[in-house]
Amino acid sequence: MDAVLLLLRWAHILGAVLTAGGLFFSRFAVLPAVADTDEATREKLHEALRRRWLPWVIGGITLLLVSGVANFLLFNAATKGPAWSANGDWMRQHNYHLIFGIKFLLALGVFYLASGLVGRGGGTAWIRRDRGLWMSVALGLAVAVIMLSGWLRNLHTGPNPGAEPEGVAVESPVDPAAAPAAEDRYRDSEAGAAFREPEAAKPPSPATD
């Protein structure tokens, strides 16, 4: 299971890098670079970029959807166990479904805008007519999704089964019957002899009248 979770984590991060990174590069590198060209050249460049970037956008969205849904289902099942909460309602206690729902809706907005920017359909032509604006909107939504992902990731830490119980440690009382044995444990040892030697070497005190 750990290997599966790790692969899903890698897939999710890779999908986010492809989608958000591509939007960032297009908005702040490609658009300013082609802004000074004539309209015919600009449209030709956008069409060439669209054809090459389309498979990567589809791949990034697919990775995010598949890995995100799988991660959610696995984590939802894990939190039902007694290690997370006595009643199996850990997600409700931490508003996990609410946060995840907001994140998912914002991510769908990013997917739609990113698909429209590299699409050819007439229904999304309004996105391509103002690429700069909608790329900025998509990036803003992507940043919000990343921030919510970090919030959810902090909640994923869950309980620490190896943690010490809270409270003050209280030592058990010493058994009186065992006290003499504890006091005499050095009597016949070398350590005890080292402490007794000065007393043996001490000269007797002079007698007083």
Image: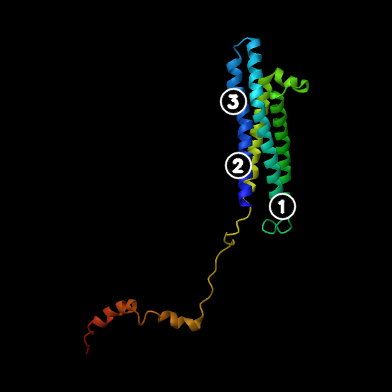
Which one is nearer the viewer's eye here, 94 or 80?
80
**Mark pair 3, 2: CA separation:** 22 Å
Residue 126 lies, with reference to residue 88, above or below; the image says: above
* Type of the residue with mark 3: Phe
Which one is nearer the viewer's eye here, 21 or 94?
21
Q: Residues within 10 Å of mark 3 (few under 14, many from 20)?
A: few
Residue 128 — which label? none
Mark 3 and mark 2 lie on one chain; the one further toward the N terminus is 2
Mark 3 and mark 1 lie on one chain; the one further toward the N terminus is 3
For image coordinates 63% across by 12% down, the residue present is 41
**Mark pair 3, 1: CA separation:** 38 Å
Residue 77 — which label? 1
Q: Residues within 10 Å of mark 2 (few under 14, many from 20)?
A: some
Q: Which residue is mark 2?
A: 10
Residue 1 percent coordinates (x, y): 64, 52
Q: Quadrant of residue 53?
A: top right
Dot 3: element: helix
